[in-house]
Amino acid sequence: MIYLDNAATTEPCAESVKACSEYFREFGNPSSLHEMGVSAANAVAAARKSIATALKADVNEIYFTSCATESNNTAIFGAAKKFGKRKKTIVTSAVEHPSVKEPLKELEKQGFNVVRIMPKDGVFYAEDFVNAVDDDTFLVTCMYCNNELGTVLPVEQIFKAVKHKNKQILTHCDIVQGFMKYPIKVKTLGADMLSMSAHKVNAFKGIGALYINSSVHIPSLIFGGGQERGFRSGTESVPLIASFGAAVDKLAPTISRRFEQVGILADLLRNEIAALPDSRINSPENGSPYIVSFSLKGYRSEILLHKLEEREIYVSSGSACSKGKKSSVLTAFGIPDEYADSTLRVSLSAENTREDILSLVSALKDAQKELLKSN
């Protein structure tokens, strides 16, 4: 099997599996005061410290959630609940993940105003976000790295300029595709809130985290037993939290090495794809090396996916088609329809090899020949 769909989910690393298994056996409730409960609480605290250390944040600024979708929803609806009676405008990019895009659509139904910034020739400019901010704006939310093309947005410049214009505006960043791939630090990035996902960093599905700057206070959305210091009630999933912390501990020291290693594979992939007939590289050259989107004009994404799957090579469709709908992200970045319909996304990890890339390209060549004959 050759797995090249790491932007969708990653294989849990051995350290993550070990940590998770340990706390499946040691099943105490972290709210209990006996020894088993204390052990569970210590595991949660250790994982919280690992994530905080990686971000150069305070441990009390990290809150565990069920996933990045919950983190994004909590940040957005929490900000709206805090400011909604006084201000109604949110500024965002036009290429956000659905877990940001859909909450914003819901807020529009409730009377909020959402300003969506489009890229210009595939590039986002901080000045466009800043110019969109006015006295009615209470939140700017912008992803770190686009999940379809790997485009890295100028978040640091955007947030710095926004805060300079109005320091009361909250800033939120979905860093799911950037966490543990880039050396993201909260003070450098200038974000009030950050959303993360465990299963994108070699841990398990079902756990995420939300960083909230200690100076920021947004209302709770989930009420109950007062877990997560009263902000997000619900018994903590200790095994999943422990797995998250273990994965971060493993990945944090190797960010630079893995980035360079994956960059070599991405360059190889780009060169090999560019040599194929009717090909187009959709990802920008200065984007994340972890995501390479490309198109083979005249060959439908779904058909190519199945041809690759027959050889146990797993990628994803970059067009994100659903019942004939085109990807709004590809449209926003100006990808022509004839290429959008034939887009594939390869998302790499440090575990991938040169042989994986060459096997993928060989399979694509064979698929092109076979499909050409059948037509």
Image: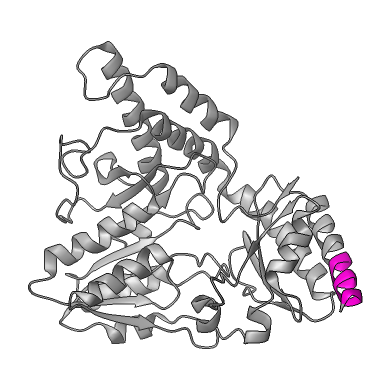
Residue 186 seen in the figure: no
Residue 271, image x and y in percent? Answer: 80, 70
Quadrant holding the C terminus:
bottom right
Compared with residue 32, is residue 336 higher up or lower down, i.e. above or below? below
Q: Nearer the viewer, residue 18 or 303?
A: 303
Q: Where does residue 337 sit, x and y in percent of width and height?
A: 62, 86
Q: Residue at x 38, y 62 (%)?
A: 99
Q: Is residue 106 left or right of residue 252?
A: left
Q: Position of residue 244 (x, y in %)?
A: 44, 37
Query: Total label count?
Result: 0
Quadrant in which the N terminus appears = top right
The figure's colour scheme reads one colour
Q: Among all residues in the image, which is located at the extreme left?
A: 85
The stretch of residues the image draws in magenta is 365-374
Please, is residue 360 above or below residue 255 in the view?
below
Q: Nearer the viewer, residue 192 or 14?
A: 14
| Residue 231 occupies quadrant | top left
The residue drawn where x is 20% and y is 84% is: 134
In this view of the protein, which residue sits in the foreground, 321 or 111?
A: 321
Residue 237 in the magenta stretch? The answer is no
Return the residue nearer the eye: 42 or 7. 7
